[in-house]
Image (spheres, rainbow, N blue to C red):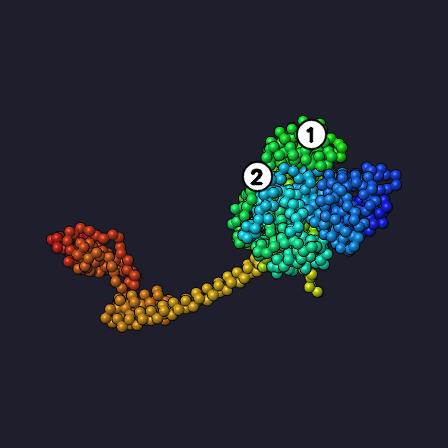
Amino acid sequence: MARVLVSHASKDAALAAEVHRWLVDEGHEAFLDRDLADGILAGEEWEKRLRERLRWADAFVCVLTSAYLASVWCTAELAIAQSRGSRLLPIRAESGVRHPLLNSVQYVDMTQDAAGARARVAEALLRVNAAGGYGWPDDRSPFPGLRALDTDEHSVFFGRAREVDQLATLLRSPAERADPAVLLVVGPSGCGKSSLVRAGLLPVLAAEPEWWTLPAFLPGAHPMATLARELAASARQLRLAWTVTDVRHRLDAGDLTGVVDDLLLAVPGRRRHHLLAVVDQFEELLTQTGTEERACFAELLRRALDGPTQVVATLRPEFLDPLLANPELAALPARTHVLRPLRREALRAVIEGPADRAGISVDADLVSRLVADTGGGEALPLLAYTLAQLSDGVGRGDCISTIRYEQLGGVQGALAGQADAALADAVTTGGRDRDQVIRELLRMVTVDERGRPTRWRIRRDELHDQVLAELQPFVDRRLLDTDTEAGHVVLGVAHEAFLSAWPPLSAAITAAASALRARREIEQAAAEWAKHGHSPTRLWERGQLAAALADTGARLGTDSTAYKPARKVPARVGRSVSWWPLRHRILIADRVDLSAQAREFLAVSIRRDQRRRGRAITILSTLLILALGLAVFAFDRQRAAEDRQLLATAGQLVAQAEARLDQDPRTALRLNEAAVHIHDSPETRSALVNNILATPYAGTLIAHAKGVRAVAFAPDKPLLASAGDDGTVRLWNLIDPAAPTPVGSPLRGHEKRIWALAFAHDGSLLASAGDDGTVRLWNL
């Protein structure tokens, strides 16, 4: 709430105390010189204290009476407050009193209606608070470093007056409101987009009577929850008894317009007609928000744009095309306003303006050197960080010298030097090596599909005490900062310039790019899984799970320092599950650290996938055995059918053999032999034997190439001679009449066919006669 100084004459202490109570009851931080809690203490230099409070105050409430007009010091206080730009709120506590320095200022009259006066003061201070106030405490540095300037730092925001006016004009334009769309402030990282909308645009419109503004917020992983929290906080300022849960239910129902209407009606005076919502770093909808919530948030904004809500968002240019092409955001109307890097000539104002506001002087030579070393607006984050380091410990009335600048290493070396020092302190504090500390820093980095690194915030309560101690040197040097997101304290890098300006971290990001990209997808999927009550259908499996495990190096292991499930799975009564090895295994990620929720998501996915694989193997094995059984059964049936078919064929051959046995015994026997070959069974063998016994046929000798013309048996030995048209004589051994065998090679000599053969009486000589007119004798 606002910081308020109550100015009064000594005689009006009771009236001033009453006004002081009003302010405190409204939640403001009020200063009254006579207040025992925070007034001027006995022995304190009252004039010095009052001047410090005048610089501190956002608003100056003066209790106007004739005594006030007569007080020289009261007039001096009023003049100082007026010169410093404090919001002046004169309360007339005595009829007819007017101060010459306040002729153009509207009075609040408490002489006739004290309650009405209190309400009007509350309304005015509500506007002062929304606009960020107008004071600057002496102990506050005017240089925030890598962090963006916020609404309450608008008095030290310099160099962008023209751009602020352009944005405000666009939002006030009836033509713009006639064609509602999200106004995207698009500019490169480090050009000052966040400071422009937070410390430039928001204070200007918050001070106008037609506007009510929400504090700028980052969408993060849960933009719906973050928006609900900001709306609920705004409602509390207006004395509405809304809870975050109540607002979230209305947002889930798509009623953002109704929520905004109720807020605007609750603003004192009921003159607010427009609400401005600023979504900083809109690209987080792509890099951190899950698909389902991104779609819900975009649809919520789209519908709200048709009402009193206007939305401004900041966006890095490299995310513009992916945003426009994203299916969940495609229906959200948007127009762009390009913000270019700060002009070189504006850098001097960025240095001198905040310093002057805080009462700090800067050597003229140092200002010139800072501008020269910065080069241009592209290096604005490095300049901002250098100024924060230079002003550290420097109070009102002090001077920033060149010596300190040289010790830091200049604009280009200040950040890297401080990061190196923080790393050294972290190693000393935690006892771990540099790579382990840098790996912890990688928890605050993510990489999109195109390899671009962006900030990633993690919950502070998920970090071990040792890790927090190691990261504290980076927090102390303003390289990391804390914030609140969805009700949790989160830790993140102060600016994305840190990701590229410090070589050790930049190199680590490049090396772990695939793991960081996979982690982003895992974290988003884990959030969706948790949102849907840990539904098994949201778990990963097969190729998607395998790719994630490969990229992150995650696996189930036995490292005692790794992840242990946060949710216990109760065992069934009377049954132990200790035999199941997966129950005792924990998730280990070698390449990148994961949040507790993401680790649980992967661990459960792995277990489920392994169980499903086990079931699949069992089912496949069962099916394989069944298939083999069916194959064997089918084979046996086929084989039986083939046997029946062969038996039938063999029976037909046996029948044909019996029919031919008398006329053609040779063919009959060959049919019997074929039947045995086709189906060797007792029946076919018996048929063959019976036919052999039933026929005088003994066999056939086949040797001549042409017809046989003559045969002769030897008189005294089992020998047969045959001759034929091929001109040869063959001899046959008949020792086994059932199986005659040829003796030697054919006897050749005749040139034509042989007609006759004759053995000598002792069988030692064979004579053959043929068509060639010769008789040949063969000595046997």
Q: Is residue 481 visible?
A: no
Q: Residue furthest right?
A: 42
In the rendered structure, the answer to whether residue 756 lies left or right of residue 418 reads: left
Q: Position of residue 496 (x, y in %)?
A: 62, 41
Q: Name the amino acid type tagged 2.
A: Arg
Q: Name the amino acid type tagged 1.
A: Tyr
Mark 2 highlights which residue? 340
Q: Position of residue 398 (x, y in %)?
A: 75, 32
Q: Nearer the viewer, residue 48 or 716?
A: 48
**Residue name at image x 83 percent, y 41 percent:** 71
Q: Nearer the viewer, residue 403 or 40?
A: 40
**Residue name at image x 68 percent, y 28 percent:** 364
SS state under label 2: loop
Q: Which mark is residue 405?
A: 1
Q: Nearer the viewer, residue 453 or 486?
A: 486
Q: Residues within 10 Å of mark 2 (few under 14, many from 20)?
A: some
Q: Is residue 471 above or below residue 181?
A: above
- Image-quadrant location for residue 538: bottom right
Q: Position of residue 95 (x, y in %)?
A: 80, 50
In the rendered structure, the answer to whether residue 461 lies left or right of residue 551 reads: right
**Residue name at image x 84 percent, y 39 percent:** 46
Is the residue under label 2 in contact with that under label 1 (CB below 8 Å)? Answer: no
Q: Nearer the viewer, residue 747 or 168?
A: 168
Sequence-wise first label, 1 or 2:
2
Give the number of the mark in front: 1 or 2.
2
Q: Is residue 662 visible?
A: yes
